[in-house]
Amino acid sequence: MSPSKTPPEIITAAGHEVSISSPDKVVFPGPGLTKLDLVHYYLAVADGALRGAGGRPMVLKRFPKGIDAEPFFQKRVPENHPDFIDTATLHYASGTSAEEAVIRDAAGLAWLVNLGCLDLNPHPVRAADLEHPDELRIDLDPMPGVGWEQIVDTALIARGVLDDVGLVGWPKTSGSRGLHILVRITPDWSYPQVRLAAETLAREVENRAPGLATARWWKEERGESVFVDFNQNAKDRTVASAYSVRPLPDARVSAPLTWQEVPSARPEQFTALTVPDRYAKDGDPHAGIDEAAGSLAALLELAGTLGPAEKAPRGAGKDGSGRRQSVMPLIEVARTRTKAEALAALEAWKAGHAGTAAGLHPADVLVDGMRGSSSLWYRVRINLQHIPEDRRPPQEELLADYDPWAGRS
């Protein structure tokens, strides 16, 4: 978002005046969407967006320098927030706490956009009860080389598991490559119980479709499959909610779908330009989600039947670090501040190891966004499992060695 001298624009939403600074600042150069355009987008889908994010504490993911720069994550609500923004104090597993923003109406959506937020990242709890989630979240995350059809097949299997345990799933595009399935639950269970239920669902999906889907937490062990990401239900995690605009060049939206739409829908169909017309014509496919809260009892009973999840392989932590050691032949290439730097380091490594690179499968290249103190950093690793042992390059000095914790206690 480049600087602009345009005076603020005052808009009225839900009976409140909201000042939008630099309203003509171009946020998405491709479709030509400005900051004010994004405000009008969220106002057009406000009821649906609030159905997903309203009344929940949220992490503010801010893009002050535009979509081509890394965002920063702000847990604490700004001190000068308007009186129509509520707050809730969350206590994290790390022992820290933060007073986070809680939006209730369309004015809150406009306020978020003015701060430079594109997508909405609420916690799975309501402000009135911060210890008992009312939403279980399933993130179908495809590994490199996995096509959309495989994601759809996994989603339909997950729906079958949910049906069998008496729960209703509400699908939406992630706004990137995958699908999310939201499950409203009664707020009767703790975070560990909800995470266990999500992990159980993931394991059952893998049991029903081995090779197609995986519940393996360690990325290098998943192969070319769809990871049913259950850890999005851990206490400190947030997920982009329904109608969130994602930081992709086409202003793609995390769009709610009906199950009938899932097989034919494609993520690129849903953008900040197309979704308002769809919403005005057809309404919100998730309009009934709040009336469909169910019980986790059957999933937790299934957890007992399946038994404990697989532990880390024998020998984990024998390097003295206390950390799990992978059974895969991994080498690390770089640690960088931005994704662009990570991809540049990857290309440099490939250029220097052309023979090895030619033998890699898509899922052997691991570029991971890692959560730092207030922003993401990136790690590049290579899984050499498909390279003959006598031709595997050794671990070399990192091409970049960014330390996200430098200067912090």
Image (cartoon, helix red, strand yellow):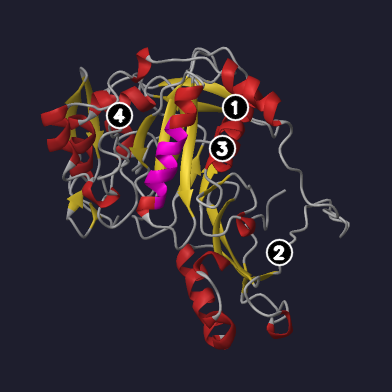
Q: Position of residue 103 (x, y in %)?
A: 37, 23
Q: Which residues are magenta?
A: 150-159
Q: Are marks 4 and 2 in contact (CB under 8 Å)?
A: no
Q: Which disc number belongs to residue 197?
A: 1
In the visual, does 265 lie left or right of 371? Answer: left
- Image position of 367 with respect to 110: above or below: below
- Image position of 326 with respect to 100: above or below: below
- Image position of 351 with respect to 214: above or below: below
Q: Measure the C-alpha gap from mark 4 to mark 2.
A: 42 Å
Q: Are marks 1 and 3 in contact (CB under 8 Å)?
A: no
- Image position of 13 with respect to 142: above or below: above
Amino acid type, mark 2: Met
Amino acid type, mark 4: Ala
The residue wearing badge 3 is: 202
The residue positioned 26% from the left and 34% from the top of the image is 260
The residue wearing badge 2 is: 328
Q: Position of residue 171 (x, y in %)?
A: 36, 34
Q: Measure the C-alpha gap from mark 1 to mark 3.
A: 9 Å
Q: Are marks 2 and 1 in contact (CB under 8 Å)?
A: no
Q: Which disc number belongs to residue 49?
A: 4
Marks 2 and 3, the one that precedes in the sequence? 3
Q: Measure the C-alpha gap from mark 3 to mark 4.
A: 27 Å
Which quarter of the rendering shows the N terminus? Answer: bottom left
